[in-house]
Amino acid sequence: MDRWELFLETFFKSEVITRYWPEILSGLWVTIEVALAVVVAGLALGLALAVLRAYRILAVTALIVVFVDMFRALPPLVVVLIFYFGLPNIGIVLSNWTVLWLVLTLVLAAFAEEIFWAGILSVPKGQWEAARSTGLGFGQALVWVVLPQAVRLTIPPLTNRTIAITKNTALGTVIGVGEILNQATTATSFSGNATPLMLGAIAYLLLFVPVVMVGRWIETRFAWERA
Amino acid sequence: MSGPAPILDIRALHKSFGATAVLQGIDLAVAQGELVFIIGPSGSGKSTLLRCCNRLEEPSAGSIMVDGADIMAPGVDLNAMRLRMGMVFQSFNLYPHMTALGNVTLALRKVQRQARAEAEERGRAALAQVGLAEKARSYPAQLSGGQQQRVAIARALALEPKIMLFDEPTSALDPELVGSVLTVMRSLREQGMTMLVVSHEMRFARDAADRVIFMDGGRIVEQGPPGALFGAPREPRTQAFLADIAH
């Protein structure tokens, strides 16, 4: 067996591919499901927190900052393990899917809040003043004048951060969520061959390369519509 | 003083930022249709005075009546009060993500709750008033500075204010663009708009103002018709200021 055959035998063994690709595919769907749920909930919660912070109520701001700093500092894997193995001890039992979704949502929300908040702060004060001087209330000025500008400024960092956190769906493997990596490692131990891991890697590429490309497209699309 | 009540009536207005007293007792009444010009060295408090009128800066003490309504009254609907006063800023402050028409109609739709068609009709009329009817669909970045400032004037005019406040409206403009903005202000004056203007455009003040106010150190030092104030200022501080800006 020459080296090339050994390589193919190790990473692209045809019997293993035929036997296990449906598992990897089902894992792909689970990953997509969790990822979408995380992106939607995480960005929505992050935006909501940034808006809340804009009202500058001291106690609220303090709570938000504590939450944000905590979830930005903790490795997501630690939180996943605490939620899954720790919370049942105080009577809170969450399914593994729920834990994975919830933790990644909170992490994304924490980062997204910081990014949205920076965006809100970077909108010039004159924009607020112009809006308020025409009779718009604080909330109206925020929604119609400031947020649209803030969100556009935040698209590039937000896209990067969202992709980075969404990839953490692979952490689901440690608590048995049947996502790509979980299916791939299981199949690898059953088959005694690394091919399923390679299939898993390909599944990640199939999923995230288009996301990265869409991210780049959004960045150019939302660059100012200027002449 | 008899005659109709002033549109803007400021009494004993004080404003401090921390320990710094910026306005130290301003009394100023602006009559219907009057164009009042405020001049003075930087730091004299003239912009702060203007910004106190619609409470973008919160006055420390004093009373401000706008068209008979006390805007300092506790529980006053400040957003409603602000509809009576149009404000034009040095830096235009147009909303960059909206077209000219979008800028002009936002408050009509969200504050006055007009239907889109109604608001756009009013907005187009306001843009026509500043000579920019054909720019309704342009974004601010596609307009020159002078055009942007005229859109900002239209945004304020669309709300049909009782008085227009201009905070150095031409200071950020290239010299060749100043004229178009002053032309619009002149036509507003001819239509009888009441205006309070902070500006360094002395020629315009001389030509168009009914009254010129010289401020220094947070106080009104001297005021009068432009001919008198520019021609024969009484106060030494006014004389010194006018001599400074003459060259």
Image (cartoon, grey):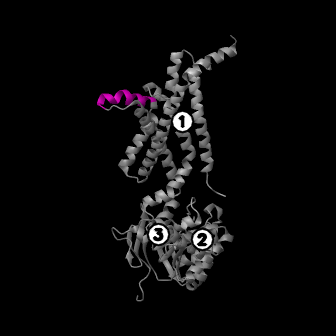
**Residue A62 percent coordinates (x, y):** 38, 45
Q: Is residue A207 above or below residue B112?
A: above
Q: Relative to residue A81, is residue A209 depicted above or below?
A: below
Marks 2 and 3, the one that precedes in the sequence: 3
- Magenta region: which residues? A77-91
Residue under label 1: A164
- Do the dots labelled 3 and 1 sit on one chain? no
Contact? badges 3 and 1 (CB < 8 Å): no
- The subunit letter for the residue under badge 3 reads B
**Mark 1 belongs to which subunit?**
A
**Which residue is disc 2 drawn over?**
B150
**Which residue is tagged 3?**
B114
User: What residue is at 63 percent from the left and 68 percent from the top?
Assistant: B135
* Separation of marks 3 and 1 at Cα, in angstroms: 44 Å
Q: CA distance from mark 2 to mark 3?
A: 23 Å
Name the residue located 44 percent from the left edge and 39 percent from the top edge.
A105
Relative image position of residue A200 (x, y in whole percent): 56, 26
For the C terminus of chain A, the image quarter is bottom right
Query: Which chain's residue wears label 2?
Result: B
The kind of residue on which mark 1 rests is Ala
Q: Secondary structure at mark 2?
A: helix
Q: Position of residue B59 (x, y in %)?
A: 41, 67
